[in-house]
Amino acid sequence: MKIDLRLPILFGVLAVLTGLIALTFEAPYVTMSQWGYRGTGMAVVYNDKAIKASEVANLVPAAQDKVEKSGKKAREVYENVQVLGDLDENEFNRLMAAITEWVSPEQGCSYCHNEEGFAHDKMYQKVVARSMLKMTQDINANWTSHVKATGVTCYTCHRGNNVPANIWFNNEPGGSMAGVIPPKTIGQNTPVKSVAYSSLPYDYGTSFLENDAQIRVNSETALPGGNQTSLMRTEHTYGLMMHMSSSLGVNCTYCHNTRNISQRENNPPQWANAWHGIRMVRTMNTGYLNPLKPVYPATRLGALGDAPKLNCATCHNGAYKPLNGTSMIPDYPELAPATATKVSYLPLKTN
């Protein structure tokens, strides 16, 4: 007697698929915090498990031990110190030890420096690090509208990695969705983390974090003739919003008033902070990171040959305040000078 196994196999496959789908559900252990006026529905929803994981991921490393000043400036002792030359020699070495811990704990000094001569600029990592030091000082001195007094350090982005975990490239995902929909044609329908695994356009960064595309898509008139925004542009904006939400671990009401999301005046203060943050990231990408393209080897460039760039997740790493709001600047004030070179936003042709 021949037994037909097709039906049991089908049920088995369905059971496995059901189990895999169930694993994607978040446990319903959430905390709601009132964020706006009562009755407006403004509440920030937190996943308790995600909060605990975020706290661990955003711990600040112990600071390097303080040192006594030697009385000599770094540029008087070492050759080719272009950014931190005014630091005391001992303070300079202390900061170098900290940067090594933050960026290359396994490779040590040799990750950026040629062992035949530390003054040489033969290694691209050293040239990049020099530019990143300038960028860090620029942010801390000129972008307090976003980072406030908390500031940033190399650790804010790197977290012990040579390359920060959260960077992006133009049109990065590529490929196709199960061979059915070619996302390179329409730039979406690819389940990627940058848009919370939704079907939204994933290359919003090129439009908003590199170029100065219009983010606002709400019509301010009663008739449709007053709004010339396309559905695709709206989806790009929503992709950016999803990115910001997942990067900070918050929902829409963290920055927006549910009564009228597009109205600036009644939004929480975080809306203005995010407004400055978008422009800060855009300026850092065009003023510091894109110009490094000729410095990087091909292995560090994206599929389209572009340099790696920042986004909100690069610093925030899932926390509404990077490193849970802990400032490392009191331990490393040299990274937050009172004044620093300020680069302007360098507009590029929108792709």
Image (tube, rainbow, N blue to C red):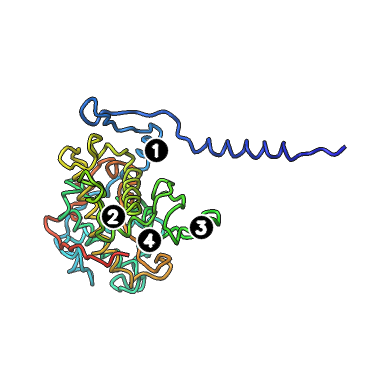
Q: Which structural element holds mark 1?
A: helix
Q: Which mark is residue 154?
A: 2
- The mark nearer the N terminus, 2 or 4, is 2
Residue 243 at x, y percent in the picture: 34, 48
- Tell us which disc is closer to us: 2 or 1: 1
Q: Which structural element holds mark 3?
A: loop
Q: On the image, which quarter does residue 310 sit in?
A: bottom left
Mark 1 → mark 4, Cα distance in angstroms: 27 Å
- The mark nearer the N terminus, 2 or 1, is 1
- The mark nearer the N terminus, 3 or 2, is 2
Q: Amino acid at mark 3?
A: Ser
- The mark nearer the N terminus, 3 or 1, is 1
Q: Which mark is residue 53?
A: 1
Q: Amino acid at mark 2?
A: Cys
Q: Which mark is residue 176?
A: 3
Q: Are the two marked residues, 3 and 1, in contact with CB atoms closer than 8 angstroms?
A: no
- Tell us which disc is closer to us: 1 or 4: 4
Residue bearing the label numbered 4: 169
Q: Are the two marked residues, 4 and 3, in contact with CB atoms closer than 8 angstroms?
A: no
Q: Are the two marked residues, 2 and 4, in contact with CB atoms closer than 8 angstroms?
A: no
Q: Amino acid at mark 1?
A: Ala
Residue 142 at x, y percent in the picture: 15, 55
Q: Are the two marked residues, 2 and 1, in contact with CB atoms closer than 8 angstroms?
A: no
Mark 2 → mark 4, Cα distance in angstroms: 20 Å
The local crowd at label 1, few if under 14, some if 14 to 19, many if 20 or more residues have their Cα within 10 Å, is: few
Mark 3 → mark 2, Cα distance in angstroms: 36 Å
Q: Amino acid at mark 4?
A: Phe
The local crowd at label 2, few if under 14, some if 14 to 19, many if 20 or more residues have their Cα within 10 Å, is: many
- The mark nearer the N terminus, 4 or 3, is 4
